[in-house]
């Protein structure tokens, strides 16, 4: 599943091809992904100029010159690729965009859990997809004070609290595990007890694991073509995620990385280093 660093990587990869360009041709080959496409999606996009691209949580935002934003979510298996101009459509290429420069961007999604919709830019923050979202983990609003305030009354394990999109937006299972390891905080610790000094360690840890993954070109558990069209998404190396039974990096404790299940999701951590 594409995580925040992958989505950020896709946005950065697409930006030079799309920002300031017009959509000369748009082909929509289905009526829906996870939800129905807006009626006349291809018609509404064709001829529009793209003003900017951004990411909010795990959504790709493409701002158009008619005041709408094309919102794209990659779901479980969605990809946005820069395809070669001559290539024929591949299986699961559901939507295709061609710019006035002849660049072809393809939305490919075998499992079709993705989403693509148009939202009035003025109403974007109040839209149901966005109104409940907490601050961006890489943004200025997210700091130890804000995180402490969000955690202070939470009676859940910190692991679950960080997956709550109202606390911080866009963090998934992998990077929550990695950030808690980096900060030396047990995933089982009560969220309320992380407010304060531990939040001061946790915020930079969250930023660091995300920024390192973005720098590495994102990461994924599956083969994943980057938005530049290259094959084989960079396989990021995790400290604890999916490493049950292995020593944690730099570990002197002889306690292997442990896997437990919290709220139905796997958690990986070092019981010695994380308290
Ligand atoms: Zn260890």
Image (cartoon, grey):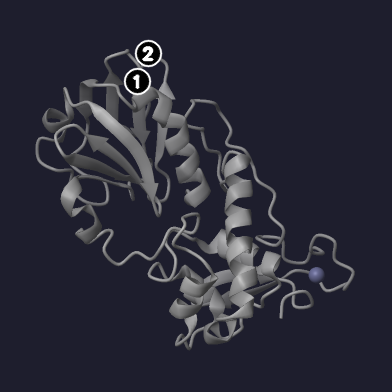
For the residues marked 1 and 2, what is the alpha-carbon distance in whole angstroms?
A: 6 Å
Q: Residue at x 38, y 70 (%)?
A: 166
Q: Which residue is mark 2?
A: 85
Q: Position of residue 225 (x, y in %)?
A: 51, 33
Vertical position of residue 39 compared to residue 191: above or below: above
Camera-side residue of 259 and 157: 157
From where the camera sits, is residue 1 visible?
no
Mark 1: C-beta under 8 Å from nearest atom of ligand 1:
no
User: Image quadrant of residue 43?
Assistant: top left
Q: Position of residue 94 (x, y in %)?
A: 29, 34
Image quadrant occupied by the C terminus: bottom right
User: Answer yes or no: do the residues labelled 1 and 2 have beta carbons within 8 Å?
Assistant: yes
From where the camera sits, is residue 107 visible?
yes
Q: Earlier in the sequence, mark 1 or mark 2?
A: 2
Ligand 1 quadrant in view: bottom right
Q: Residue at x 50, y 54 (%)?
A: 138
- Disc 1 is placed on an element classified as strand
Camera-side residue of 2 and 14: 14
Q: Which residue is mark 1?
A: 104
Left or right: residue 220 versus residue 163 is right
Q: How many labels sit on residues?
A: 2
Left or right: residue 39 versus residue 9 is left
Label ID, residue 213: none
């Amino acid at each position: 599943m594409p995580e925040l660093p992958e989505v950020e990587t896709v946005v950065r990869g697409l930006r030079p091809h799309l920002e300031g360009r017009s959509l000369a041709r748009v082909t929509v080959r289905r009526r829906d992904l996870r939800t129905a496409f807006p009626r006349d999606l291809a018609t509404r996009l064709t001829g529009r100029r793209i003003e900017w691209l951004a990411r909010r949580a795990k959504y790709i935002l493409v701002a158009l010159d008619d005041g709408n934003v094309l919102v794209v979510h990659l779901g479980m298996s969605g990809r946005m690729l820069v395809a070669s101009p001559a290539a024929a459509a591949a299986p699961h290429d559901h939507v295709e965009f061609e710019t006035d420069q002849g660049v072809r961007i393809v939305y490919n999604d075998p499992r079709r859990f993705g989403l693509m919709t148009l939202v009035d830019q003025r109403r974007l923050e109040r839209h149901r997809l966005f109104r409940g979202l907490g601050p961006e983990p890489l943004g200025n609003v997210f700091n130890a004070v804000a995180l402490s305030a969000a955690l202070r009354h939470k009676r859940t394990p910190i692991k679950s609290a960080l997956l709550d999109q109202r606390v911080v937006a866009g963090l998934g299972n992998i990077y929550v595990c990695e950030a808690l390891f980096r900060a030396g905080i047990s995933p089982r610790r009560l969220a309320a007890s992380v407010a304060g000094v531990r939040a001061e360690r946790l915020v930079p840890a969250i930023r660091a694991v995300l920024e390192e993954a973005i720098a590495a070109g994102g990461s994924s558990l599956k083969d994943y073509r980057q938005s530049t069209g290259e094959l084989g998404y960079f396989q990021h190396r995790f400290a604890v995620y999916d490493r049950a039974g292995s020593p944690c990096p730099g570990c002197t404790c002889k306690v292997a990385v442990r896997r437990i299940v919290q709220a139905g999701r796997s958690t990986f951590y070092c019981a010695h280093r994380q308290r």
